[in-house]
Image (cartoon, rainbow, N blue to C red):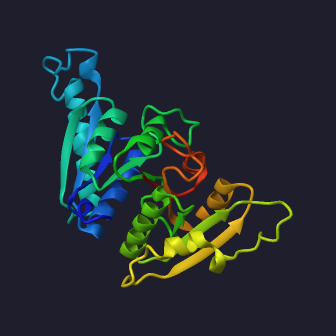
Amino acid sequence: MSPADAVKPVIVGYDSSDGSRRAVLWAAHHAVATKLTLVVVHCWVWPFFTQDLGPVPAVKDSGLQSAAERTAAEGLDLAKQAEPGVEVSLRLIVGFPSEVLTRLSAEASLLVTGTRGLGGFAGLLVGSVSLHLAASASCPIAVIRDDRPAQGDVLVAVDGSPESDRAVVQAASLATTVHVPLRVLHVRPYARHARTRLPDPEHDPVIQQALNLLPEDADLKVIEDSFAEPSVPGVIIHHSHQAICVVLGAKGTNTLGARLGSSVHAVLHHARGNVLVVR
């Protein structure tokens, strides 16, 4: 986290879905651990479609606006219950979540979302809003599956790209904050007949580049892993099983023109735990 980001809040989207509940809980814990303020955002779209926002005559707390206000207050209360000491505020904004949260990301040190909201299809592992934010947010975005992950490390996958370098810095900060090891993973180019399939981090320049970015005074255990395998996302997903969070650059050295790399897309869909995307 840069010094400028240190004064920006953590922003989390809430829509009362199970995924957004986990996102609010995780965001509250993270805000307290990093001594940042938290903003809970609820987006509602009904004013785009009707002027009849309520209340219904003689029916207390009825109408679409009251429902939106209750949902927003529910998110705020959830954050306070998770972390009574958190400094948290609430924003109820008219607009579509993907557009609103993308705009607000310019004001955040971290944007937090669940894997799927109320509008998602049950069979999808990651909803369209989360994918949109991972590709478009101005700040790092955390996609949360587990608000209290079990013991593990913070896994950062590196490839030497500028986004990868920024991911290393973010991952080191997270690992230091939650007092877990940092695992630096590089999946090297694969050649079927080459004798390079065994881990060899000591001679991997991409690993060494990542290590050079770590603060010298950080109390941080670092694990280095370097593999040559045909599937980059396959290796990351396999190692994600022992991580409390996977940290990735939004795109790598082989991604031209795209806002989100194919490996990041695959990891967002298939990693079992939390994923943090940095651009």
Residue 171 drawn at (x, y percent): 44, 67
Q: Give the residue furthest to the left.
A: 58
Q: Look at the image and tell me in which quarter the N terminus lies.
A: bottom left
Residue 3 drawn at (x, y percent): 25, 66
Residue drawn where x is 15% and y is 27% of the image: 60
Residue 2 quadrant = bottom left
Q: Nearer the viewer, residue 10 or 55?
A: 10
Q: Give the residue furthest to the right.
A: 193
Residue 208 drawn at (x, y percent): 55, 75
Q: Is residue 152 visible?
A: no
Q: Is residue 260 left or right of 25 when viewed as pictured?
A: right
Q: Is residue 230 above or below residue 199?
A: above
Q: Is residue 195 above or below residue 55?
A: below
Q: Nearer the viewer, residue 87 or 81?
A: 87
Residue drawn where x is 20% and y is 15% of the image: 52
Q: Is residue 139 above or below residue 100?
A: below
Residue 45 quadrant = top left
